[in-house]
Amino acid sequence: MASPPVEKPAAAEPISLALNWRTALAVFRAVLAVLCLGLSLSGSNPNTRNFAFLWAGFTLYAVVVIFWRRLDRDFPLFSLLVDTVFLLICAALPFEYSAGITSLFYLFVLLVAALLHTTREVVIVIALTIAFFYAARPTEIVVLSPSLLLSGMAVTIMALQKKALQDRLSAAAKQSVMFRSEAEHAREAERQRMAADFHDGPLQSFVGLQMRLEVVRKILERDPKLAMEEIVQLQELSKMQAAELRAFVRSMRPVEVDGAGLVPSLRKLVEGFGKESGISANFVGGNTRVSPDSQSSLEILQVVREALHNVQKHSKASRVTVGVGREGNTFELSIEDDGTGFPFSGAYTLEELELLRLGPISIRRRVRILGGEMMLDSQPGKGASLKIRVPV
């Protein structure tokens, strides 16, 4: 069964969200710059008015950043440095509403650091600002220190949370890439299996039929009676080929778990195989109660179907037995036949089969996906047995 297509995660949404944050912060910066410029020009302190040109420069910078986004995006540390420097200037040159403007500016710089930078840079800004206040504004630090510390702690926590979310997003992205790779490998393996089955089965049969028809045509010119006997044999061969083609088409259909659960679905699959193939198929352990998730159930069903298909196609078996059981939280599955076995002899675990590249590839891969254990015992000329243990 081919794996369903995996949707690729859209990267446009996180990028758009980051751009929206940058735009909002750039506008916030411009508003702060205009506010500081206005207060410096209208203030009664001449010392403050003398530094109005600094706020005019900061206002120009803030407006430029709004329209020239690359300055803020390509040089984030420079932008953070400029904001921090003007925060300290705002703290050193008191306005009429000094405490409120400084707190607002401080909160803005912390938001920039938390949203667009690392936790280390957030801590550096907090430490630098508090140290500056202790040195330049010792009389006001008693009033401002609670708000400085509390807002700093809140933004630091937010930065740590952002880092944790980024790590989780990165892990999810890597897992998504891994799942897409596994799905692609599964599709490729399934395509190769289908191509090989079609080449070894229906295609070879039709080639043989074509050659027999050519022989009949030549015989018909010399001995019509013998040609009629050949035609009767061809009719039987065509019936066999039609049955083989129907079996091939059936093997391409996706397996389904009916409402009764995994074990009844396995029983139905085995009974149907016996009726269609003519091979005596027995199912043991029908009273076993197990309820794996839907995806695991589909994988187990597919393992059994592929194993039965291999028995019909390669083993020349007259009997096959499928058994199920449960031991604790482990689902046990066994498939035994009396056919010709595999080309190799002996019992091998899943790891040994993968190392030696023996056994059915698709079944090995499915058992690995299920996180299960597998033992394949082959006795050429006497049959083979496959035992699988899957956690449920």
Image (spheres, rainbow, N blue to C red):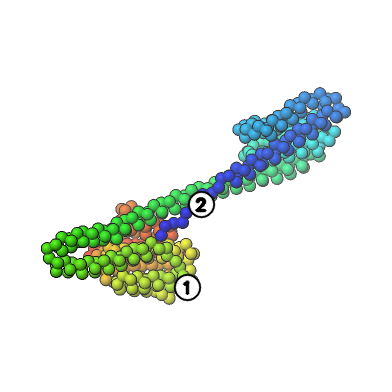
Count of labels shown?
Answer: 2
Q: Which mark is residue 41?
A: none
Residue drawn 46% across the image and 70% down it: 258
Element on which disc 2 rests: loop
Element on which disc 1 rests: loop
Residue drawn 49% across the image and 71% down it: 259
Picture quarter containing residue 373? bottom left
Q: Image height check: is 51 above or below 124?
A: above
Residue 129 or residue 294, whichever sits in front: 294
Percent across and percent down for residue 324 are 39, 70
Residue 93 or residue 218, whichever sits in front: 218
Classify the position of the N terminus by image quarter.
bottom left
- Mark 2–mark 1 Cα distance, whole angstroms, equals 31 Å
Residue 204 or residue 64, whichever sits in front: 204
Horizontally, is 2 left or right of 164 in the view? left
Q: Which residue is label 1 attached to?
A: 260
Whether residue 101 is visible here, answered yes or no, is: yes
Percent across and percent down for residue 181 are 44, 49
Q: Image height check: is 157 above or below 217?
A: above
Three-letter amino acid code at disc 1? Ala
Q: Residues within 10 Å of mark 2 (few under 14, many from 20)?
A: few
Q: Nearer the viewer, mark 2 or mark 1?
A: 2
Q: Residues within 10 Å of mark 1 (few under 14, many from 20)?
A: few
Percent across and percent down for residue 61 are 70, 29
Whether residue 72 is visible here, answered yes or no, is: no
Looking at this view, name the residue that lies furthest to the right: 44
Three-letter amino acid code at disc 2? Glu
Q: Which residue is label 2 attached to?
A: 7
Residue drawn 76% across the image and 32% down it: 33
